[in-house]
């Protein structure tokens, strides 16, 4: 808690630390695991994790930078406007759409989850492999074209 841009999250018993370049946030557990969020590239994620480790090391804690891996990548894509009712009919069995509960449609392909909004904005989560997102998008694309507004 002596560092700059550091706060304690008592709900999850973690320390949250932020840096400006690259603009990222780290959650540090009491076991010493550091999870980095907000990087825009793999290189930025690696640089930020090393930077957080160095900051913690300068505070006097024994730190070793090991077991770095990317667990999840979130991407955002903007396409044309879509009729979600029509899209849910075309993707029956592979999606969930309940407009009373949430404005987006969730599409599942292998371990990728895509949230599609009527504006055409799509949020891809669930994988660290960008080629999985590409395959999921091309699986979704024909139905998107048919539901185009």
Image (cartoon, helix red, strand yellow):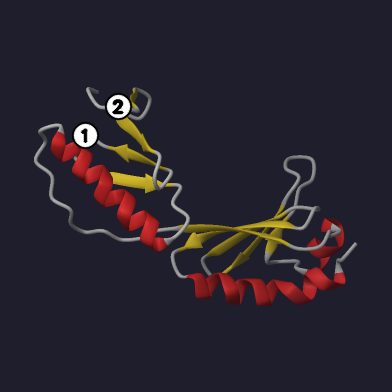
Is residue 102 placed above or below 132 in the rendered structure?
above
Is residue 87 placed above or below 51 in the rendered structure?
below
Residue at the front extreme, as displayed: 21
Within 10 Å of the Cα at label 2, are there few (<14), some (14-19), or many (20+) other Cα atoms? few
**Location of residue 128 in the rendering, given as x and y in whole percent from the top left corner:** 44, 65
Specify the label residue 123 is tagged with: none
Residue at the right extreme, as displayed: 149
Nearer the observer, 21 or 57: 21
Q: Nearer the viewer, mark 2 or mark 1?
A: 2
**What residue do we see at 51% from left, 66% from top?**
111
**What residue do we see at 35% from left, 40% from top?**
26
In the rendered image, which quarter is residue 106 located in? Answer: bottom right
Within 10 Å of the Cα at label 1, are there few (<14), some (14-19), or many (20+) other Cα atoms? few
In the rendered image, which quarter is residue 147 located in? Answer: bottom right
**Location of residue 84 in the rendering, given as x and y in whole percent from the top left corner:** 82, 57
Quadrant housing the N terminus: top left
**Location of residue 20 in the rendering, given as x and y in whole percent from the top left corner:** 40, 39
Please give left or right for residue 2 compared with residue 12 in the image. Answer: left
Question: Element type at marker 2?
Answer: loop
Quadrant housing the C terminus: bottom right
**Location of residue 114 in the rendering, given as x and y in whole percent from the top left corner:** 63, 60
The residue wearing badge 1 is 30
The residue wearing badge 2 is 4
Please give left or right for residue 134 compared with residue 52 in the image. Answer: right
In three-dimensional space, the C-alpha distance between marks 2 and 1, rounded to whole angstroms, equals: 18 Å
Question: Element type at marker 1?
Answer: loop
Please give left or right for residue 124 compared with residue 98 in the image. Answer: left
Is residue 119 placed above or below 137 in the rendered structure?
above
Query: What is the tally of numbered marks visible in this picture?
Result: 2
**What residue do we see at 40% from left, 48% from top?**
22
Mark with earlier residue (2, 1): 2
In the rendered image, which quarter is residue 55 located in? Answer: top left
């Amino acid at each position: 808690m002596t560092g700059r841009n550091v706060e304690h999250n008592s709900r999850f018993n973690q320390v949250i630390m932020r840096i400006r370049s690259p603009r990222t946030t780290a959650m540090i557990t009491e076991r010493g695991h550091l999870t980095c969020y907000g990087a825009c590239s793999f290189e930025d994620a690696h640089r930020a994790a090393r930077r957080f480790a160095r900051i913690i090391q300068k505070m006097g804690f024994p730190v070793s930078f090991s077991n770095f891996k990317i667990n999840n990548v979130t991407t955002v894509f903007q396409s044309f406007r879509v009729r979600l009712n029509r899209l849910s009919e075309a993707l029956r069995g592979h999606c969930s759409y309940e407009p009373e509960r949430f404005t987006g449609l969730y599409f599942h392909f292998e371990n990728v989850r895509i949230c599609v909004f009527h504006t055409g904005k799509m949020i891809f989560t669930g994988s660290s492999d960008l080629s999985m997102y590409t395959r999921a998008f091309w699986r979704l694309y024909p139905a998107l074209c048919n539901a185009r507004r």
